[in-house]
Protein backbone atom coordinates (compact mmCIF):
# COMPACT_ATOMS: atom_id res chain seq x y z
CA UNK A 1 0.00 0.00 0.00
CA UNK A 2 1.46 3.34 -1.10
CA UNK A 3 0.42 6.34 1.01
CA UNK A 4 2.38 8.89 -1.04
CA UNK A 5 0.41 11.23 -3.29
CA UNK A 6 0.96 10.50 -7.00
CA UNK A 7 3.74 12.69 -8.51
CA UNK A 8 1.32 14.82 -10.58
CA UNK A 9 -0.69 15.69 -7.44
CA UNK A 10 2.51 16.47 -5.52
CA UNK A 11 3.44 18.85 -8.34
CA UNK A 12 0.03 20.52 -8.15
CA UNK A 13 0.34 20.76 -4.37
CA UNK A 14 3.74 22.46 -4.61
CA UNK A 15 2.41 24.97 -7.16
CA UNK A 16 -0.63 25.89 -5.06
CA UNK A 17 1.42 26.02 -1.85
CA UNK A 18 3.89 28.41 -3.45
CA UNK A 19 1.05 30.63 -4.74
CA UNK A 20 -0.63 30.73 -1.33
CA UNK A 21 2.62 31.66 0.44
CA UNK A 22 3.67 34.27 -2.12
CA UNK A 23 0.33 35.87 -2.99
CA UNK A 24 -2.34 35.17 -0.37
CA UNK A 25 -0.73 34.98 3.06
CA UNK A 26 0.96 38.41 2.75
CA UNK A 27 -2.38 40.16 2.07
CA UNK A 28 -4.73 37.98 4.09
CA UNK A 29 -5.24 40.42 6.97
CA UNK A 30 -6.25 43.19 4.54
CA UNK A 31 -9.30 41.26 3.28
CA UNK A 32 -12.46 42.46 4.96
CA UNK A 33 -14.74 39.44 5.01
CA UNK A 34 -17.72 41.51 6.02
CA UNK A 35 -17.81 43.31 2.70
CA UNK A 36 -18.06 41.74 -0.73
CA UNK A 37 -14.67 41.08 -2.21
CA UNK A 38 -15.04 43.39 -5.19
CA UNK A 39 -14.30 41.94 -8.64
CA UNK A 40 -11.40 44.38 -9.08
CA UNK A 41 -9.72 42.97 -5.94
CA UNK A 42 -10.37 39.39 -7.00
CA UNK A 43 -9.50 39.72 -10.71
CA UNK A 44 -5.70 40.15 -10.46
CA UNK A 45 -5.54 37.02 -8.28
CA UNK A 46 -7.71 35.12 -10.74
CA UNK A 47 -5.39 36.16 -13.59
CA UNK A 48 -2.38 34.82 -11.67
CA UNK A 49 -4.23 31.58 -10.98
CA UNK A 50 -5.06 31.23 -14.68
CA UNK A 51 -1.42 31.84 -15.63
CA UNK A 52 -0.44 28.99 -13.33
CA UNK A 53 -2.95 26.65 -15.01
CA UNK A 54 -5.06 26.41 -11.86
CA UNK A 55 -8.32 27.84 -13.26
CA UNK A 56 -11.60 25.89 -12.88
CA UNK A 57 -10.05 23.32 -10.54
CA UNK A 58 -13.47 22.04 -9.54
CA UNK A 59 -14.88 21.65 -13.05
CA UNK A 60 -14.98 18.49 -15.19
CA UNK A 61 -12.88 18.49 -18.41
CA UNK A 62 -15.90 18.44 -20.72
CA UNK A 63 -16.86 21.91 -19.43
CA UNK A 64 -13.40 23.41 -19.79
CA UNK A 65 -12.17 22.56 -16.29
CA UNK A 66 -9.14 20.60 -15.15
CA UNK A 67 -11.14 17.41 -14.57
CA UNK A 68 -9.22 16.70 -11.37
CA UNK A 69 -9.71 13.69 -9.14
CA UNK A 70 -11.35 14.13 -5.75
CA UNK A 71 -7.94 13.51 -4.11
CA UNK A 72 -6.38 16.35 -6.12
CA UNK A 73 -9.27 18.67 -5.26
CA UNK A 74 -8.89 17.92 -1.56
CA UNK A 75 -5.15 18.63 -1.73
CA UNK A 76 -5.83 22.00 -3.40
CA UNK A 77 -8.55 22.87 -0.89
CA UNK A 78 -6.19 22.01 1.96
CA UNK A 79 -3.48 24.29 0.56
CA UNK A 80 -5.61 27.33 -0.29
CA UNK A 81 -7.44 27.17 3.03
CA UNK A 82 -4.15 27.85 4.78
CA UNK A 83 -4.66 31.51 4.09
CA UNK A 84 -7.42 33.52 5.72
CA UNK A 85 -7.78 35.29 2.37
CA UNK A 86 -9.21 32.17 0.82
CA UNK A 87 -11.91 30.50 2.82
CA UNK A 88 -15.38 31.66 1.94
CA UNK A 89 -15.13 35.17 0.50
CA UNK A 90 -12.42 34.52 -2.06
CA UNK A 91 -13.92 31.18 -2.96
CA UNK A 92 -14.21 32.26 -6.60
CA UNK A 93 -10.41 32.52 -6.74
CA UNK A 94 -9.95 29.35 -8.79
CA UNK A 95 -13.18 29.57 -10.76
CA UNK A 96 -16.78 30.37 -9.86
CA UNK A 97 -18.33 27.89 -7.41
CA UNK A 98 -20.79 25.67 -9.28
CA UNK A 99 -21.87 22.69 -7.19
CA UNK A 100 -22.72 19.29 -8.60
CA UNK A 101 -26.45 19.72 -9.21
CA UNK A 102 -25.88 21.99 -12.20
CA UNK A 103 -23.89 19.26 -13.94
CA UNK A 104 -27.13 17.26 -14.02
CA UNK A 105 -28.75 19.86 -16.32
CA UNK A 106 -29.95 18.64 -19.71
CA UNK A 107 -28.22 20.07 -22.80
CA UNK A 108 -30.61 22.99 -23.18
CA UNK A 109 -30.38 23.86 -19.45
CA UNK A 110 -26.59 23.68 -19.57
CA UNK A 111 -26.61 26.65 -21.96
CA UNK A 112 -29.00 28.67 -19.76
CA UNK A 113 -27.88 27.72 -16.24
CA UNK A 114 -24.50 26.02 -16.12
CA UNK A 115 -22.41 27.88 -18.68
CA UNK A 116 -23.20 31.44 -17.47
CA UNK A 117 -22.18 30.32 -13.93
CA UNK A 118 -18.95 28.80 -15.25
CA UNK A 119 -18.18 32.01 -17.14
CA UNK A 120 -18.70 33.96 -13.91
CA UNK A 121 -21.62 35.91 -15.38
CA UNK A 122 -24.29 34.51 -13.06
CA UNK A 123 -24.37 33.32 -9.45
CA UNK A 124 -26.56 30.54 -8.18
CA UNK A 125 -27.30 29.46 -4.62
CA UNK A 126 -28.59 26.20 -3.10
CA UNK A 127 -31.85 26.54 -1.15
CA UNK A 128 -32.95 23.58 0.95
CA UNK A 129 -33.24 24.70 4.60
CA UNK A 130 -36.55 26.08 5.88
CA UNK A 131 -37.64 27.64 9.17
CA UNK A 132 -39.18 24.30 10.24
CA UNK A 133 -36.88 21.95 8.34
CA UNK A 134 -33.15 22.30 8.92
CA UNK A 135 -31.67 19.07 10.27
CA UNK A 136 -34.70 17.22 8.94
CA UNK A 137 -34.93 18.33 5.30
CA UNK A 138 -37.42 15.52 4.57
CA UNK A 139 -39.90 17.60 6.56
CA UNK A 140 -39.69 20.56 4.15
CA UNK A 141 -42.92 22.31 3.21
CA UNK A 142 -42.06 24.50 0.23
CA UNK A 143 -44.50 23.29 -2.41
CA UNK A 144 -44.24 23.28 -6.18
CA UNK A 145 -47.71 22.64 -7.62
CA UNK A 146 -48.15 21.95 -11.34
CA UNK A 147 -50.23 24.44 -13.27
CA UNK A 148 -50.08 23.71 -17.01
CA UNK A 149 -46.44 23.87 -18.08
CA UNK A 150 -45.40 25.72 -14.90
CA UNK A 151 -44.86 25.02 -11.22
CA UNK A 152 -46.31 27.46 -8.72
CA UNK A 153 -43.90 27.67 -5.77
CA UNK A 154 -44.87 28.71 -2.27
CA UNK A 155 -42.75 28.55 0.88
CA UNK A 156 -39.74 29.97 2.72
CA UNK A 157 -36.06 29.04 2.56
CA UNK A 158 -33.60 30.46 5.05
CA UNK A 159 -29.92 30.60 5.99
CA UNK A 160 -29.04 30.36 2.28
CA UNK A 161 -25.38 31.07 1.49
CA UNK A 162 -24.81 33.44 -1.41
CA UNK A 163 -28.52 34.21 -1.84
CA UNK A 164 -28.04 37.92 -1.17
CA UNK A 165 -26.37 38.48 -4.52
CA UNK A 166 -27.54 35.36 -6.39
CA UNK A 167 -29.21 35.58 -9.80
CA UNK A 168 -30.95 32.25 -9.32
CA UNK A 169 -31.58 29.60 -6.68
CA UNK A 170 -31.63 25.83 -6.94
CA UNK A 171 -34.75 25.31 -4.85
CA UNK A 172 -35.39 21.91 -3.32
CA UNK A 173 -39.18 21.65 -3.01
CA UNK A 174 -42.05 19.20 -2.56
CA UNK A 175 -43.77 18.11 -5.77
CA UNK A 176 -45.60 15.13 -4.22
CA UNK A 177 -46.36 15.35 -0.48
CA UNK A 178 -47.51 11.71 -0.37
CA UNK A 179 -44.08 10.46 -1.44
CA UNK A 180 -42.06 13.15 0.41
CA UNK A 181 -38.34 12.33 0.48
CA UNK A 182 -39.02 9.00 -1.31
CA UNK A 183 -39.55 10.50 -4.75
CA UNK A 184 -41.72 13.51 -3.91
CA UNK A 185 -39.03 16.23 -3.75
CA UNK A 186 -37.62 18.00 -6.82
CA UNK A 187 -34.97 20.58 -7.69
CA UNK A 188 -36.12 23.65 -9.62
CA UNK A 189 -34.02 26.62 -10.75
CA UNK A 190 -35.79 29.84 -9.80
CA UNK A 191 -34.86 33.31 -11.03
CA UNK A 192 -34.33 35.51 -7.97
CA UNK A 193 -35.93 38.47 -9.77
CA UNK A 194 -39.08 36.59 -10.85
CA UNK A 195 -42.44 37.88 -9.59
CA UNK A 196 -43.33 36.15 -6.30
CA UNK A 197 -39.68 35.71 -5.22
CA UNK A 198 -38.42 37.98 -2.47
CA UNK A 199 -35.24 38.08 -0.44
CA UNK A 200 -36.82 39.16 2.85
CA UNK A 201 -33.91 39.07 5.26
CA UNK A 202 -30.13 38.92 5.55
CA UNK A 203 -29.28 37.06 8.76
CA UNK A 204 -26.20 38.64 10.30
CA UNK A 205 -24.16 36.19 12.31
CA UNK A 206 -20.77 35.44 13.79
CA UNK A 207 -19.13 34.68 10.43
CA UNK A 208 -19.28 38.26 9.05
CA UNK A 209 -21.01 36.83 6.01
CA UNK A 210 -24.82 37.11 6.12
CA UNK A 211 -27.06 34.26 4.91
CA UNK A 212 -30.38 35.12 3.28
CA UNK A 213 -34.03 34.21 3.72
CA UNK A 214 -36.13 33.87 0.57
CA UNK A 215 -39.93 33.84 0.40
CA UNK A 216 -41.70 32.26 -2.59
CA UNK A 217 -45.24 33.54 -2.84
CA UNK A 218 -46.87 31.85 -5.82
CA UNK A 219 -43.75 32.18 -8.02
CA UNK A 220 -44.41 30.66 -11.47
CA UNK A 221 -41.48 28.64 -12.80
CA UNK A 222 -41.47 26.70 -16.11
CA UNK A 223 -41.41 22.93 -15.59
CA UNK A 224 -38.54 23.02 -18.12
CA UNK A 225 -36.44 24.64 -15.34
CA UNK A 226 -36.54 21.51 -13.16
CA UNK A 227 -33.18 19.75 -12.94
CA UNK A 228 -33.38 15.98 -13.26
CA UNK A 229 -36.59 13.99 -13.10
CA UNK A 230 -39.54 15.01 -10.95
CA UNK A 231 -38.97 13.48 -7.51
CA UNK A 232 -35.19 13.27 -7.92
CA UNK A 233 -34.40 16.48 -6.03
CA UNK A 234 -33.79 14.98 -2.59
CA UNK A 235 -31.19 12.59 -3.98
CA UNK A 236 -29.50 15.38 -5.96
CA UNK A 237 -29.36 17.53 -2.82
CA UNK A 238 -27.83 14.67 -0.82
CA UNK A 239 -25.20 14.14 -3.54
CA UNK A 240 -24.39 17.86 -3.34
CA UNK A 241 -24.06 17.68 0.43
CA UNK A 242 -21.80 14.61 0.34
CA UNK A 243 -19.32 16.53 -1.85
CA UNK A 244 -19.72 19.67 0.29
CA UNK A 245 -18.86 17.67 3.44
CA UNK A 246 -15.59 16.37 1.99
CA UNK A 247 -14.71 19.91 0.92
CA UNK A 248 -15.50 21.23 4.40
CA UNK A 249 -13.19 18.58 5.88
CA UNK A 250 -10.32 19.46 3.51
CA UNK A 251 -10.80 23.15 4.36
CA UNK A 252 -10.69 22.30 8.07
CA UNK A 253 -7.48 20.34 7.51
CA UNK A 254 -5.82 23.32 5.78
CA UNK A 255 -6.78 25.71 8.56
CA UNK A 256 -5.60 23.22 11.19
CA UNK A 257 -2.24 22.79 9.44
CA UNK A 258 -1.62 26.56 9.33
CA UNK A 259 -2.62 26.99 12.99
CA UNK A 260 -0.21 24.20 13.91
CA UNK A 261 2.65 25.76 11.89
CA UNK A 262 1.96 29.17 13.44
CA UNK A 263 1.96 27.62 16.92
CA UNK A 264 5.33 25.94 16.44
CA UNK A 265 6.91 29.13 15.06
CA UNK A 266 5.53 31.21 17.90
CA UNK A 267 6.47 28.67 20.58
CA UNK A 268 10.06 28.76 19.33
CA UNK A 269 10.28 32.55 19.24
CA UNK A 270 8.38 33.53 22.39
CA UNK A 271 10.07 33.19 25.76
CA UNK A 272 8.57 33.45 29.23
CA UNK A 273 10.87 33.53 32.25
CA UNK A 274 13.78 33.22 29.81
CA UNK A 275 12.58 29.87 28.43
CA UNK A 276 11.02 29.39 24.95
CA UNK A 277 7.36 28.34 25.14
CA UNK A 278 8.26 25.33 23.00
CA UNK A 279 10.30 23.95 25.90
CA UNK A 280 7.36 24.11 28.31
CA UNK A 281 5.78 20.71 28.67
CA UNK A 282 2.22 22.06 28.70
CA UNK A 283 2.85 23.65 25.29
CA UNK A 284 4.66 20.58 23.95
CA UNK A 285 1.66 18.40 24.83
CA UNK A 286 -0.66 20.72 22.90
CA UNK A 287 1.62 20.65 19.87
CA UNK A 288 1.97 16.86 19.95
CA UNK A 289 -1.82 16.45 20.18
CA UNK A 290 -2.30 18.77 17.19
CA UNK A 291 0.26 16.82 15.14
CA UNK A 292 -1.45 13.47 15.85
CA UNK A 293 -4.93 14.73 15.16
CA UNK A 294 -3.95 16.50 11.93
CA UNK A 295 -2.17 13.39 10.71
CA UNK A 296 -5.13 11.10 11.31
CA UNK A 297 -7.53 13.62 9.74
CA UNK A 298 -5.40 13.87 6.61
CA UNK A 299 -5.31 10.09 6.20
CA UNK A 300 -9.09 9.88 6.62
CA UNK A 301 -9.74 12.61 4.08
CA UNK A 302 -7.40 11.20 1.44
CA UNK A 303 -8.88 7.74 1.95
CA UNK A 304 -12.43 9.08 1.51
CA UNK A 305 -11.46 11.09 -1.56
CA UNK A 306 -9.71 8.06 -3.06
CA UNK A 307 -12.83 5.94 -2.49
CA UNK A 308 -14.93 8.65 -4.17
CA UNK A 309 -12.58 8.46 -7.16
CA UNK A 310 -13.14 4.67 -7.25
CA UNK A 311 -16.91 5.43 -7.47
CA UNK A 312 -17.56 3.79 -4.12
CA UNK A 313 -20.55 4.83 -2.01
CA UNK A 314 -18.85 7.25 0.42
CA UNK A 315 -21.87 8.76 2.18
CA UNK A 316 -20.86 7.38 5.59
CA UNK A 317 -17.20 8.30 5.08
CA UNK A 318 -18.29 11.84 4.17
CA UNK A 319 -20.22 12.11 7.46
CA UNK A 320 -17.14 10.88 9.31
CA UNK A 321 -14.68 13.32 7.73
CA UNK A 322 -17.03 16.28 8.17
CA UNK A 323 -17.42 15.48 11.88
CA UNK A 324 -13.72 14.69 12.42
CA UNK A 325 -12.54 17.65 10.34
CA UNK A 326 -14.57 20.29 12.11
CA UNK A 327 -14.00 18.88 15.58
CA UNK A 328 -10.25 18.52 14.98
CA UNK A 329 -9.82 22.04 13.65
CA UNK A 330 -11.87 23.42 16.56
CA UNK A 331 -9.44 21.86 19.04
CA UNK A 332 -6.37 22.87 17.03
CA UNK A 333 -7.43 26.53 16.76
CA UNK A 334 -8.29 26.61 20.44
CA UNK A 335 -4.80 25.38 21.33
CA UNK A 336 -3.20 27.79 18.83
CA UNK A 337 -5.00 30.70 20.50
CA UNK A 338 -3.88 29.44 23.90
CA UNK A 339 -0.24 29.26 22.77
CA UNK A 340 -0.39 32.79 21.30
CA UNK A 341 -1.99 34.21 24.45
CA UNK A 342 -3.81 37.54 24.05
CA UNK A 343 -2.18 38.00 20.65
CA UNK A 344 -4.10 34.94 19.51
CA UNK A 345 -7.39 36.66 20.29
CA UNK A 346 -6.44 39.86 18.46
CA UNK A 347 -7.38 40.80 14.92
CA UNK A 348 -3.69 41.03 14.07
CA UNK A 349 -3.74 37.26 13.49
CA UNK A 350 -6.25 35.12 11.54
CA UNK A 351 -6.95 32.77 14.48
CA UNK A 352 -10.03 34.54 15.90
CA UNK A 353 -11.57 34.69 12.41
CA UNK A 354 -11.08 30.96 11.84
CA UNK A 355 -12.42 30.23 15.32
CA UNK A 356 -15.72 31.88 14.33
CA UNK A 357 -15.75 30.31 10.88
CA UNK A 358 -15.26 26.74 11.98
CA UNK A 359 -17.89 27.10 14.69
CA UNK A 360 -20.46 27.96 12.06
CA UNK A 361 -19.23 25.20 9.73
CA UNK A 362 -20.05 22.64 12.43
CA UNK A 363 -23.71 23.45 11.70
CA UNK A 364 -23.64 24.21 7.95
CA UNK A 365 -23.97 21.16 5.66
CA UNK A 366 -25.38 19.13 8.56
CA UNK A 367 -24.80 19.67 12.29
CA UNK A 368 -22.25 17.26 13.75
CA UNK A 369 -24.82 15.73 16.15
CA UNK A 370 -27.18 15.02 13.28
CA UNK A 371 -24.44 13.51 11.14
CA UNK A 372 -23.45 11.25 14.05
CA UNK A 373 -27.06 10.15 14.42
CA UNK A 374 -27.45 9.35 10.70
CA UNK A 375 -24.07 7.62 10.64
CA UNK A 376 -24.91 5.41 13.62
CA UNK A 377 -28.29 4.55 12.10
CA UNK A 378 -26.71 3.64 8.73
CA UNK A 379 -24.01 1.51 10.38
CA UNK A 380 -26.59 -0.36 12.48
CA UNK A 381 -28.74 -1.00 9.41
CA UNK A 382 -25.74 -2.27 7.47
CA UNK A 383 -25.03 -4.85 10.20
CA UNK A 384 -28.55 -6.26 10.38
CA UNK A 385 -28.74 -9.57 8.51
CA UNK A 386 -31.16 -9.39 5.62
CA UNK A 387 -34.16 -11.74 5.88
CA UNK A 388 -33.71 -14.75 3.59
CA UNK A 389 -35.50 -14.44 0.27
CA UNK A 390 -38.73 -16.46 0.12
CA UNK A 391 -38.77 -19.31 -2.43
CA UNK A 392 -41.53 -18.82 -5.04
CA UNK A 393 -43.74 -21.55 -3.55
CA UNK A 394 -43.34 -20.04 -0.05
CA UNK A 395 -44.69 -16.63 -1.11
CA UNK A 396 -47.87 -15.65 0.70
C1 LIG B 1 -23.00 29.28 7.63
C2 LIG B 1 -24.20 28.52 7.20
C3 LIG B 1 -24.48 28.43 5.85
C4 LIG B 1 -25.61 27.73 5.42
N1 LIG B 1 -25.87 27.67 4.09
C5 LIG B 1 -26.98 27.01 3.65
C6 LIG B 1 -27.29 26.96 2.25
O1 LIG B 1 -26.56 27.51 1.40
N2 LIG B 1 -28.40 26.30 1.86
C7 LIG B 1 -29.22 25.67 2.74
O2 LIG B 1 -30.21 25.08 2.32
N3 LIG B 1 -28.96 25.70 4.10
C8 LIG B 1 -27.86 26.36 4.56
N4 LIG B 1 -27.59 26.41 5.90
C9 LIG B 1 -28.51 25.82 6.84
C10 LIG B 1 -27.99 24.55 7.50
O3 LIG B 1 -28.02 23.48 6.59
C11 LIG B 1 -28.87 24.27 8.73
O4 LIG B 1 -28.65 25.34 9.64
C12 LIG B 1 -28.55 22.95 9.39
O5 LIG B 1 -28.96 21.88 8.59
C13 LIG B 1 -29.23 22.83 10.78
O6 LIG B 1 -30.56 23.20 10.72
P1 LIG B 1 -31.16 24.23 11.79
O7 LIG B 1 -30.26 25.40 11.85
O8 LIG B 1 -32.58 24.48 11.44
O9 LIG B 1 -31.08 23.50 13.19
P2 LIG B 1 -32.14 22.48 13.82
O10 LIG B 1 -32.60 21.50 12.82
O11 LIG B 1 -33.19 23.27 14.52
O12 LIG B 1 -31.24 21.74 14.89
C14 LIG B 1 -30.69 22.45 16.02
C15 LIG B 1 -29.67 21.56 16.69
O13 LIG B 1 -30.32 20.43 17.25
C16 LIG B 1 -29.50 19.29 17.17
N5 LIG B 1 -30.23 18.25 16.43
C17 LIG B 1 -31.21 18.44 15.50
N6 LIG B 1 -31.66 17.26 15.05
C18 LIG B 1 -30.96 16.30 15.67
C19 LIG B 1 -30.93 14.88 15.62
N7 LIG B 1 -31.73 14.19 14.78
N8 LIG B 1 -30.06 14.21 16.41
C20 LIG B 1 -29.23 14.89 17.25
N9 LIG B 1 -29.20 16.23 17.35
C21 LIG B 1 -30.05 16.93 16.57
C22 LIG B 1 -28.21 19.73 16.45
O14 LIG B 1 -27.23 20.02 17.41
C23 LIG B 1 -28.61 21.00 15.75
O15 LIG B 1 -27.54 21.90 15.59
C24 LIG B 1 -26.45 27.10 6.37
C25 LIG B 1 -26.16 27.19 7.74
C26 LIG B 1 -25.04 27.89 8.15
C27 LIG B 1 -24.73 27.96 9.61
Image (tube, grey):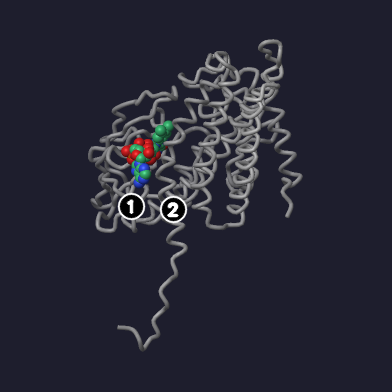
Beta carbon at label 1 within 8 Å of ligand 1: no
Task: Work out whether 39 lies above or below 151.
Answer: above
If you read the primary sequence from the N terminus, does the residue marked by circle 1 or circle 2 appear first?
A: 1
User: In the picture, residue 48 is in which quadrant?
Assistant: top right
SS label for mark 1: strand
Q: In the shown orientation, is residue 290 left or right of residue 172?
A: right
Task: Work out whether 321 lies above or below 213.
Answer: below
What quarter of the picture does the N terminus occupy?
A: bottom right
Q: Nearer the viewer, residue 19 or 344?
A: 344
Q: Is residue 190 visible?
A: no
Q: In the shown orientation, is residue 3 left or right of residue 156?
A: right
Furthest-top residue in this view: 273
- Tell me whether the residue at label 1 lies in contact with that at label 2, contact meaning CB atoms closer than 8 angstroms: no
Residue, disc 1: 185
Q: In the shown orientation, is residue 365 left or right of residue 44?
A: left
Can you give x and y, in whole percent of width and height, for residue 104 in the image? 47, 51
Circle 1 crowding by C-alpha within 10 Å: few under 14, some 14–19, many from 20: many
Can you give x and y, in whole percent of width and height, for residue 375 in the image? 45, 51
Furthest-right residue in this view: 7
SS label for mark 2: helix
Dividing the image into four equal quarters, which quarter contains ligand 1? top left
Closer to the observer: label 1 or label 2? 2
Q: Nearer the viewer, residue 379 or 241?
A: 379
Label number found at residue 376:
2
Can you give x and y, in whole percent of width and height, for residue 346 in the image? 53, 14
Label number found at residue 44:
none
Q: Residue at x 55, y 18 (%)?
A: 31
Q: Is residue 117 visible?
A: yes
Marks 1 and 2, how far apart at CA? 25 Å
What quarter of the picture does the C terminus occupy?
A: bottom left
Amino acid sequence: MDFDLPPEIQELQAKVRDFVRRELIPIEMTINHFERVEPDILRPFQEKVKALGLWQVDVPKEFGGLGLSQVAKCVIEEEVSQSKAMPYRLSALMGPPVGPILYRCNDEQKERFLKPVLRGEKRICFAQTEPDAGSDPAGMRTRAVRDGDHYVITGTKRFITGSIDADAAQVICVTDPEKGANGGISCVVVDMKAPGVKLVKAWQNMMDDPVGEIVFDGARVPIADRIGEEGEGFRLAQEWLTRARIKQAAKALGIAQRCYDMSIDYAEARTTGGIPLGERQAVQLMIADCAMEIRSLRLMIYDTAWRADQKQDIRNEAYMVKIMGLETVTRVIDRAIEIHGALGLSKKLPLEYWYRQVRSSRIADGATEVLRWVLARNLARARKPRPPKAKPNEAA
